[in-house]
Image (tube, rainbow, N blue to C red):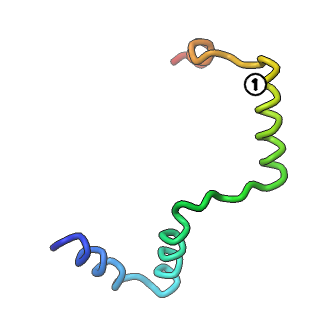
């Protein structure tokens, strides 16, 4: 069975709601999710910390968490 036929067989087994959800996922696969105001504030704070030099190396993270 080729890929298109296999996909069609799977779609045929789905409910209408599942197909609509799948269609939405496919149509929006390249659209970034919008951030909430809280998430945007977190991103901006992280950038500010980085600009202030408040960073750790990957080696420090590995040492701290035992990797």
Residue 23: horizontal and vertical position, in percent? 49, 76
Residue 12 or residue 47, whichever sits in front: 47
Q: Residue at x 30, y 74 (%)?
A: 7
Which quarter of the rendered picture does the N terminus lie within?
A: bottom left
In the image, residue 39 above or below residue 23 = above
Name the residue furthest left. 1
- Is 60 on the left-hand or right-hand side of 51? left
Secondary structure under the numbered disc 1 in the rendered image: helix
Q: Residue at x 79, y 23 (%)?
A: 51
Q: Quadrant of residue 49?
A: top right
Residue 2: horizontal and vertical position, in percent? 18, 72
In the image, residue 13 above or below residue 42 = below
Residue 54: horizontal and vertical position, in percent? 77, 19
Residue 50: horizontal and vertical position, in percent? 75, 24
Q: Quadrant of residue 55?
A: top right
Residue behind mark 1: 50
- Is 39 on the left-hand or right-hand side of 33? right
């Amino acid at each position: 069975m080729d890929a298109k036929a296999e996909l069609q067989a799977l779609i045929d087994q789905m409910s209408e709601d599942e197909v609509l959800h799948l269609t939405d996922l496919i149509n929006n696969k390249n659209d970034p999710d919008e951030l909430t105001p809280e998430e945007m504030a977190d991103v901006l704070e992280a950038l500010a910390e980085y600009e202030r030099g408040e960073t750790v190396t990957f080696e420090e993270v590995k040492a701290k968490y035992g990797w």
